[in-house]
Image (tube, helix red, strand yellow):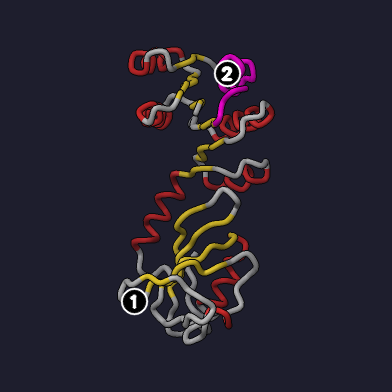
Amino acid sequence: MYILVCGGGKVGFYLAQELLNAKHEVLVIERDPGRAGQIADELSSNILQGDSCEATTLDAAGVARADLICAVTGDDEDNLVICEIARQRGVPRTIARINNPKNEELFKKRGIETTVSATQVVLAQIEQELPTHDVIPLLQLHSGLEIIEIRIPETSPAAGRSVRDVLLPAESMISLIVDPGGVPRMPSGDTRLNAGDALVVVTRKDSLPMLREVLIGSTHGMDT
């Protein structure tokens, strides 16, 4: 796989190292000549000094044959421009680093579905460590779906009911149930939901309010 890493900061440099160790063909594009020189000392010929926001630079890097572009500069606007140029050049996959989580929606509106926000990753990890959170984000999928964990409280309207009797939002599915003892089971329509169960659910972000109401209850304390 030929991968262009746009941005030679710490994120881009270590990402390139890992990709090279995995035997991929990698080229780092870095705007700053001094930093590009430092990377050249470490990665030999796997560096191009230039501005990734310019189509001519990406063309010189061989963007037409790239399988993936990782836009990981420290500037969200630059990463957006890089991904849009890459899409115009026919690159099948782009991944953008987002430094400000508020920009995630803008990227998705512009058709860039695969984004990585360090802030959101750390926040999700914190939420997994907090027992007061009933809804824990686990993973965002390329299709716009996400995987979350929901713990059923005693007051849940779904407690004691079978999966088939719980009206979930459209495009939502319970994929795994872990009981309070830590035993996982694959649910069927007849599987009964019990208080204390942790449900792994595939859903869309805009379905979360309805999902909370169905599985947690509208009167239960809800964290965001």
Secondary structure beneath dot 1 equals loop
Q: Camera-side residue: 217 or 27? A: 27
> Residue 75 placed where, x, y %?
53, 32
**Residue 214 against residue 62 in the figure, above or below:** below
Q: Camera-side residue: 21 or 36? A: 21
Q: Image quarter for residue 16?
A: top left
User: Do residues under tags 1 and 2 come within 8 Å of each other at their CB atoms?
Assistant: no
Taking the magenta stretch, the answer to whether it contains residue 79 is no
> Residue 24 placed where, x, y %?
43, 27
Q: Which residue position is annotated with label 2?
A: 62
> Residue 146 placed where, x, y %?
53, 57
Stretch of the chain drawn in magenta: 51-67
**Residue 100 against residue 78 in the figure, above or below:** below
Of pointers 1 and 2, the one earlier in the residue sequence:
2
> Residue 118 placed where, x, y %?
44, 44
Q: Camera-side residue: 200 or 175? A: 175
The residue lying at 45 percent from left, 68 percent from top is 176
Q: Which residue position is annotated with label 1?
A: 180
Residue farthest to the bottom, as pictured = 160
